[in-house]
Image (cartoon, grey):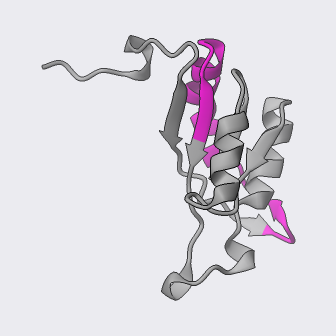
Amino acid sequence: MPKLSIKDLELKGKRVFIRVDFNVPIKEGKVDDDTRIQASLPTINFAVEQGARVVLASHLGRPKGERVEKYSLSPVAEHLSKVLDKPVAFATDCIADEAQSKLVRLVEGYYVLH
């Protein structure tokens, strides 16, 4: 069976989950090097151009299973909003009610970062 790529799928109106590597250096609350973010843009933009509602998932770390503010992806969501010139909603948790409500309200052509 041949391996499919995102270009082989019908994305219009679908919620598309994309695992991205946004493990980027953050200094003073800002993304210091966005090379990994830039590398993901062709896939993210393709999905949006096809009419998908994009859910991005990544992590920076959770030492000993504990949430540590300095490892929050919030600065990444803020940076990505600027790069994409569109709002990127940020969910602080991927399974809580907050995350679910952001997914339900997600409209075509917009993003949620978990």
Spot occupied by residue 57 in the image (x, y as percentages of width and height): 55, 49
Residue 35: tell me if it is visible: no
Q: Residue at x 58, y 19 (%)?
A: 46
Is 32 left or right of 64, judged from the image as shown? right
Foreground pick, 66 / 24: 66
Residue 17: tell me if it is visible: yes
Location of residue 69 with respect to 83 vertically, above or below? below
Q: In which quadrant of the rendered image does the N terminus lie?
A: top left
Location of residue 51 with respect to 25 vertically, above or below? above
Magenta-span inclusion, residue 31: yes
Q: Residue at x 59, y 12 (%)?
A: 50
Spot occupied by residue 71 in the image (x, y as percentages of width and height): 67, 72
Spot occupied by residue 77 in the image (x, y as percentages of width and height): 76, 50
Is 33 left or right of 96, judged from the image as shown? right
Foreground pick, 67 / 39: 67
Magenta-span inclusion, residue 18: no
**Residue farthest toward the bottom in the current orientation of the protein:** 64
Which stretch did the figure color magenta? 27-55
So how many labels did they put on this image?
0
Q: Residue at x 63, y 14 (%)?
A: 51
Spot occupied by residue 2 in the image (x, y as percentages of width and height): 18, 18
Q: Residue at x 45, y 11 (%)?
A: 10
Is 39 left or right of 76, judged from the image as shown? left
